[in-house]
């Protein structure tokens, strides 16, 4: 009777433990150690904040087209100040630029916005040979679920990859499901939901390896985590009940 009890207990432990295969990242890295990097093009979306600076040979000529590019006493402003001084993209995808009025920037790249403003300034006779600098200053991603430090994180990199985003959140816990991470993305007025497997290198060549502003990553719990939370399979329930019954029989038979 005791031997059966220990066998059942051993099987129960095995069903609740994560295997090495469940925990390791990019397990085929040896076979795929070299690959071309495919950077993603970022386009302007509603609620982006653009920091736009215009420069000319005569600084006074472009002053009216800038919204305080430096802080008090010539100090470089922090990110919050840059956001307050920036241009918020409306739900219609426009910004209101000095002298030029309402400009549509929706779905344009940073380079395309820069060239569009430059052309408008020249064609309208506002400035000659201006230099225009454009940057998104409120880029952020959200990481939720089985990570050490879930939350929303601002970043300044032009290209942020999936692993860097997980690094902002302190990496997955041992209870995080690595082969089925959810990525939600809103682009061009539509929502995309995909599933990412970071135990394999294939996703590193997909359009989802490099993140886009406002992406949301959700790390669901793995099977052992779900099991320990009480949401367990029928076989695990059966084994648990059997263990309790056998334990009671052993105690009563003494």
Image (cartoon, rainbow, N blue to C red):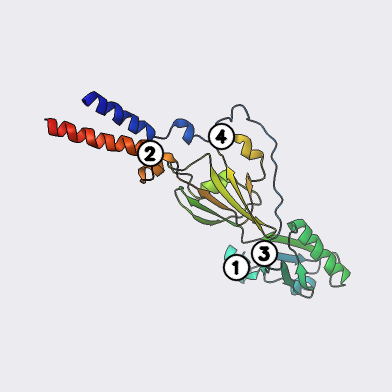
Q: Please tell me which residue lies in front, 125 or 23.
A: 23
Q: Residue at x 73, y 68 (%)?
A: 94
Percent position of residue 241, x then y: 28, 38
Q: Is residue 34 above or below residue 221?
A: above
Which residue corresponds to mark 4?
A: 26
Crowding around mark 1 (Cα neighbors within 10 Å: few <14, some 14 to 19, many 20+) is some
Residue 81 shows which numbered tag? Answer: 1
Question: SS class of the residue under badge 3?
Answer: loop
Percent position of residue 232, x then y: 38, 42
Question: SS class of the residue under badge 2?
Answer: helix
Question: SS class of the residue under badge 1?
Answer: helix
Q: Residue at x 84, y 68 (%)?
A: 120
Mark 2 or mark 4, earlier in chain: 4
Crowding around mark 3 (Cα neighbors within 10 Å: few <14, some 14 to 19, many 20+) is some
Name the side, left or right, on which 218 lies relative to 70. left
Quarter of the picture containing the N terminus is top left
Q: Is residue 160 above or below residue 8?
A: below
Q: Quadrant of residue 190?
A: bottom right
Crowding around mark 4 (Cα neighbors within 10 Å: few <14, some 14 to 19, many 20+) is some
Residue 46 shows which numbered tag? Answer: 3
Mark 3 or mark 2, earlier in chain: 3
Residue 234 shows which numbered tag? Answer: 2
């Amino acid at each position: 009777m005791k031997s059966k009890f220990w066998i059942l207990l051993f099987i129960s432990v095995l069903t609740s433990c994560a295997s090495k295969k469940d925990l390791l990242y990019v397990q085929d890295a040896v076979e795929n150690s070299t690959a071309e990097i495919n950077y993603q093009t970022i386009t302007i979306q509603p609620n982006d904040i653009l920091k736009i600076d215009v420069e000319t040979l005569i600084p006074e000529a472009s002053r009216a087209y800038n919204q305080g590019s430096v802080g008090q006493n010539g100090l470089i402003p922090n990110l919050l100040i840059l956001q307050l001084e920036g241009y918020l993209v409306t739900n219609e995808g426009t910004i209101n630029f000095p002298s030029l009025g309402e400009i549509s920037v929706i779905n344009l790249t940073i380079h395309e916005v820069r060239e569009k403003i430059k052309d408008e300034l020249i064609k309208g006779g506002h400035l000659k040979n201006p230099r225009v600098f454009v940057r998104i200053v409120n880029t952020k991603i959200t990481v939720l679920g089985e990570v050490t430090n879930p939350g929303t994180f601002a970043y300044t990199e032009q290209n942020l990859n999936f692993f860097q985003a997980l690094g902002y959140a302190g990496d997955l816990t041992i209870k995080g499901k690595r082969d089925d991470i959810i990525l939600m993305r809103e682009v061009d007025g539509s929502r995309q939901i995909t599933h990412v497997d970071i135990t394999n290198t294939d996703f590193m060549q997909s359009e989802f390896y490099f993140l886009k502003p406002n992406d949301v990553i959700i790390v669901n719990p793995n099977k052992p985590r779900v099991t320990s939370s009480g949401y367990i399979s029928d076989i695990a329930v059966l084994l648990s009940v059997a263990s309790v019954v056998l334990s009671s029989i052993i105690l009563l038979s003494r």
